[in-house]
Image: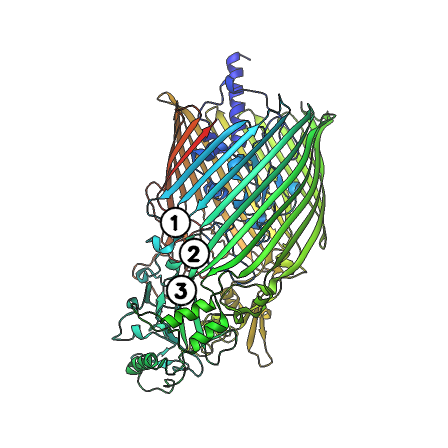
């Protein structure tokens, strides 16, 4: 073979190596041609995420994305959450600080400042997060989800993302994939960095600074110690700071579905002033919600207070509310939570001799987040109980206001049996005087690790003992009040729900609110702890098959204790009788729980021939309370010619239920909606006073809670792909994958689904002896499953231009299938890809990142396009029934952003990076989404970045 041919083959092999292990983002960081001979060097043995076998190459049968530090810095990325938002393998789920900003009902506690990792749409609790190959503790409140804000990002050297299941290697939670954050190992010197990411429109700014120092050299001094500290501040971004957060767009079919307004709506109630509703003299239809501002001749809803407007009864199929007003609480909501983060990490490594090293590592973080919500919505009741607030009664304090409301209603509706002067007014009111609700959560996390690594008789070993803990607590920080005092202020008429703008509550009213303020009260706290002893060894078995490489193996054990506790003040058992509207969770308190996990695993790497390699792994886990589960994995890599590789894998996986799903208490919460009827009598169970069998409104208790009889979820994963590298400057990889989950743990079935399919869920509707529905059971059970599949594409092209080096990369994810079934006995029905989905990840069919980078001398430029495909929008009830607004569009448009960055290293030891995110200042696409538990209305936080155009500058100096 000629020297030219040899060089060409070497270049092809290097290109293929890059294609298998270095994704587009990592390749962009190195603009020099890595195929030149000067780049060829002998690699140390290393372990790649997804395998326990150490090897001198990093080619793998599994699809692995490796993101190097240089690329992270070039993009101006300062947190793990920002990094995940750039990855197409990460799903569009409610896992970011912007996508889950709503009030958490009891038992869920929301994210409370938590950012989760969610790969391939399997959920943040089914994606395993590692730090240097070992587990960290799940968040103290979020149960089984690791908070990415606890990861010490300033010390990260690279991030490895295994896009495949890995229960055979790591055990539970690795169904969607594995993200391994890997820190530096042998660092000397000092570096300091600082950066700012400032939005053009204001709000949502991000600031960060870090310091890194290292001493000693492992090779010469036989020891190394380094430490890093990072501080980061995310400033608040409110909905009213962005024009696209606007719920009043009736021409498109969007309107707020809330009747809690700053100038209160009068609503029906037995024994109230309007009884069961009033007949409209113009149409004869019964009106169940009336705002005097919206009556013919009234001042109009828009004049009733900030962000008020008419209720869109047509879109919401609620003709009884046509005289009602609505309020844009989506615009009042916080769409980026303020978060302050302090992170630190240190590592000491001692080289005992050439074959053995001892290390100790400590990681700690403190995260403080504040969640801001709209002011309290107060719904009043006749003869209110201790947990309810009283209707507006006629007395000396209220007579002037009461008479004004009655007279305006009587002027239009006239004398009717249901209109009774002197009876209390039941209403829905947005208590502006109460101020915005706030929850402050402080999370402290740490991990202490001691380990020993080295080589014995040509076998590499790794032993570690670690303890990781996350402790979090939430306190009321404003907008919440002791119920008895609040009841007294409302019952006496001291607080007036019928004030126009410019009118203000009395000083006595504000004094009463101040005396009832519950700020500073502990809401709940939780602690999650993991203690682990693990040991593994890998090496050659001393024989070959038909190839040149030895058969290699890895074996190991994993002994782990998991602990969890959750509690708070006992007074929360009173619920609303204690503090009105606060998401207390006393029924879910649990004394400290623990379980032991013992696991053994083995892995074999079989070079069958020089071109065919098989890998077999198996792991057996034994859990207290569950028994054992064994999960294998089979994978192959076939290299028939130098420029082509085929790869594939099959494995099973599992995910054990977290402590909260097992042991949390039973919660009974009254359904607060006014739209529910008995689905056994009324089709779809939607209340309508003018439709027979649907004219009886029900408000049963919704029952949620734990189930100690839950079993682990199970999964099957399959993947098949190929890599082509015809030249050193071009490569492309394509991987098909499929994940099927069954015996899934579910709760909180969509209530509209339950009522629309009542025969299937009939046993969940609990009735009293008279046949009336008193409860709807939505507790956790093992049932049903999901089927997800797709194709991942990665292509790279590089060359020279104008004396510099350029590269183009394309990374895309095509989602082909996303099907679910609620019960094991049912087949999978319907494909949700491209359809709006409320409770799961938003299943977008196609998304990609397309980037161009060019480097010459001290300058490096990059331009990146981030694309998220459109989908069919959610359909409000009225539009589903045939109503069509003038500008209605059933499809949400695609979303495309452009990001630009430039780096300069013209001064020794100094690096400056300037970037513009959202270069064209593109607003999120319009959507009809409007959810109580989400971020607001008019846009989708699972897809879009609400910050708009932002300018970031980062400076790093090494000395």
Query: Disc 1 on helix, strand or loop?
Result: loop
The structure residue drawn at horizontal position 34% and vertical position 62%, both measured from the top left corner, is: 253
Mark 3 or mark 2, whichever is nearer to me:
2
- Per the image, the residue denoted by label 2 is 935
Q: Nearer the viewer, residue 860 or 26?
A: 860
Residue beneath disc 3 = 880
Which scheme is used to colour this image of the protein? rainbow
- Say whether marks 1 and 2 touch (CB < 8 Å): yes
User: Of residues 86 and 613, which is closer to you in this image?
Assistant: 86
- Residue 630: percent from left, percent from top: 70, 46
Earlier sequence position, callout 1 versus callout 2: 2
Q: Is residue 642 left or right of residue 256?
A: right
850 sits left or right of 440 in the view: left
Crowd class of label 3 (few under 14; some 14 to 19; many from 20; radius 10 Å): few
- Asked whether disc 1 touches disc 3, contact meaning CB atoms under 8 Å apart, the reply is no
First of labels 3, 2 by sequence position:
3
Circle 2 — which element?
A: loop
Q: Give 55 or 587, whichever is nearer the viewer.
A: 587
Above or below, 367 against 313 in this view is above
888 to 451, vertically: above or below:
below
Task: Answer few, some or many: residues within 10 Å of disc 1's Cα (few below 14, many 20 plus, some between 14 and 19).
Answer: many
Q: Earlier in the sequence, mark 1 or mark 3?
A: 3
Q: Residues within 10 Å of mark 2 (few under 14, many from 20)?
A: many
- Quarter residue 294 falls in: bottom left
Reply above or below: 759 against 411: above
Residue 525 quadrant: bottom right
Mark 1 → mark 2, Cα distance in angstroms: 10 Å
Q: Is residue 187 visible?
A: yes
In the image, is residue 356 above or below residue 260?
above
The Cα–Cα distance between marks 3 and 2, rounded to whole angstroms, is 23 Å
Mark 1 sits on what residue?
Answer: 946
Mark 1 or 3, closer to the camera: 1
């Amino acid at each position: 073979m000629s020297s030219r041919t040899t060089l060409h083959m070497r270049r092809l092999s290097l290109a293929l190596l890059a294609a298998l292990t270095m994704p587009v983002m990592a390749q962009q960081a190195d603009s020099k041609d890595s195929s030149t001979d000067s780049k060829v060097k002998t690699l140390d043995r290393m372990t790649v995420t997804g395998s326990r076998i150490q090897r001198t190459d990093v080619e793998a049968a599994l699809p692995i994305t490796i993101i190097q530090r240089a690329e992270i810095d070039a993009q101006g990325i300062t947190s793990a959450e920002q990094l995940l938002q750039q990855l197409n393998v990460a799903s569009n789920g409610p896992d970011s600080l912007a996508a889950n900003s709503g009030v958490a009902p009891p038992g869920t506690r929301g994210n409370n400042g938590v950012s989760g990792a969610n790969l391939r749409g399997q959920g943040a609790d089914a994606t395993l997060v590692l730090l240097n190959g070992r587990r960290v503790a799940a968040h103290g409140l979020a149960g089984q989800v690791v908070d990415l804000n606890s990861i010490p990002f300033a010390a990260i050297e690279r991030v490895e993302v295994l896009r495949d299941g890995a229960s055979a290697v790591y055990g539970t939670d690795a169904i969607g994939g594995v993200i391994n954050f890997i820190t530096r190992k042998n660092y000397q010197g000092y570096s300091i960095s600082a950066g700012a990411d400032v939005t053009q429109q204001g709000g949502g700014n991000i600031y960060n600074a870090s310091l890194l120092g290292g001493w000693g050299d492992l090779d010469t001094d036989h020891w190394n110690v380094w430490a890093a500290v990072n501080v980061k501040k995310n400033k608040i971004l409110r909905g009213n700071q962005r024009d696209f957060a606007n719920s009043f767009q009736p021409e498109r079919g969007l309107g707020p579905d809330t009747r809690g307004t700053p100038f209160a709506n009068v609503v029906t109630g037995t024994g109230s002033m309007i009884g069961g509703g009033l007949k409209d003299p113009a149409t004869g239809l019964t009106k169940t919600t009336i705002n005097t501002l919206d009556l013919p001749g009234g001042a109009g809803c828009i004049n009733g207070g900030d962000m008020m407007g008419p209720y869109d009864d047509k879109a919401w199929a609620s003709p009884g509310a046509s005289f009602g007003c609505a309020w844009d609480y989506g615009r009042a909501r916080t769409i980026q939570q303020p978060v302050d983060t302090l992170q630190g990490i240190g590592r000491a490594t001692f080289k005992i001799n050439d074959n053995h090293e001892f290390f100790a590592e400590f990681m700690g973080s403190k995260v403080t987040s504040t969640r801001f919500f709209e002011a309290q919505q107060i719904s009043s009741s006749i003869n209110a109980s201790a947990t309810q607030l009283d209707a507006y009664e006629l007395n000396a304090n209220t007579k002037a206001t009461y008479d004004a409301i009655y007279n305006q209603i009587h002027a239009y509706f006239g004398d009717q049996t249901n209109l009774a002067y002197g009876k209390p007014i039941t209403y829905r009111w947005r208590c502006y005087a109460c101020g915005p609700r706030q929850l402050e959560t402080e999370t402290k996390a740490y991990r202490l690790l001691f380990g020993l690594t080295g080589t014995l008789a040509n076998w590499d070993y790794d032993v570690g003992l670690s303890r990781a803990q996350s402790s979090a607590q939430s306190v009321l920080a404003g907008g919440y009040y002791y119920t008895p005092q609040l009841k007294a202020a409302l019952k006496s008429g001291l607080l007036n729900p019928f004030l126009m703008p410019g009118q203000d509550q009395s000083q006595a009213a504000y004094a009463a609110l101040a005396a009832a303020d519950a700020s500073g009260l502990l809401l709940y706290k939780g602690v999650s702890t993991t203690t682990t002893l693990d040991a593994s060894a890998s090496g050659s078995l001393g024989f070959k098959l038909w190839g040149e490489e030895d058969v290699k193996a890895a074996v190991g054990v994993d002994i782990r204790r998991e602990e969890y506790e959750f509690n708070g003040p006992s007074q929360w058992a009173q619920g609303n009788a204690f503090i009105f509207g606060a998401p207390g969770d006393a029924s879910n308190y649990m004394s400290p729980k623990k379980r032991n996990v013992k696991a053994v695993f083995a892995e074999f790497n079989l070079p069958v021939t020089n071109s065919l390699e098989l890998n077999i792994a198996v792991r057996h886990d034994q859990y207290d309370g569950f028994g054992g589960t064994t999960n294998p994995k089979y994978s192959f890599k076939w290299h028939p010619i130098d420029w082509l590789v085929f790869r594939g894998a099959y494995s099973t996986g599992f995910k054990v239920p977290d402590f909260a799903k097992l042991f949390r208490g039973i919660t009974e919460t009254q359904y607060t909606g006014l739209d529910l009827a008995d689905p056994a009598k009324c089709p779809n169970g939607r209340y309508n006073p003018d439709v027979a069998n649907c004219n009886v409104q029900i408000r049963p208790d919704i029952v949620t809670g734990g189930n100690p009889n839950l079993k682990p979820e199970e999964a099957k994963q399959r993947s098949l792909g190929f890599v082509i590298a015809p030249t050193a400057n071009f490569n492309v990889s394509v991987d098909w994958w499929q994940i099927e989950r069954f015996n899934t743990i579910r709760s909180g079935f969509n209530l509209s689904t339950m009522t629309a399919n009542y025969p299937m869920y009939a046993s969940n509707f609990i009735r009293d002896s008279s046949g009336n529905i008193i409860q709807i059971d939505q507790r956790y059970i093992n049932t049903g499953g999901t089927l997800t599949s797709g194709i991942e594409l990665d292509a790279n092209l590089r060359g020279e231009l104008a004396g510099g080096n350029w590269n183009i990369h394309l990374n895309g994810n095509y989602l082909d299938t996303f099907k679910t079934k609620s019960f094991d006995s049912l087949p999978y029905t319907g494909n949700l890809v491209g359809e709006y989905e409320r409770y799961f990840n938003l299943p977008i069919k196609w998304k990609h990142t397309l980037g161009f980078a060019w480097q010459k001398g001290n300058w490096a430029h990059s331009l990146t396009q981030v694309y998220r495909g459109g989908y069919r929008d959610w359909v409000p009830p009225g539009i589903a029934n045939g109503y069509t607004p003038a500008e209605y569009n059933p499809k949400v448009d695609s979303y495309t952003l452009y990001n630009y960055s430039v780096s300069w290293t013209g001064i020794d030891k100094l690096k400056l990076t300037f970037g513009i995110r959202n270069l064209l200042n593109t607003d999120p696409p319009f959507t009809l989404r409007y959810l109580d538990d989400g971020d607001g209305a008019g846009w989708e936080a699972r897809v879009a970045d609400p910050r708009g155009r932002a300018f970031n500058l980062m400076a790093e100096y090494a000395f």
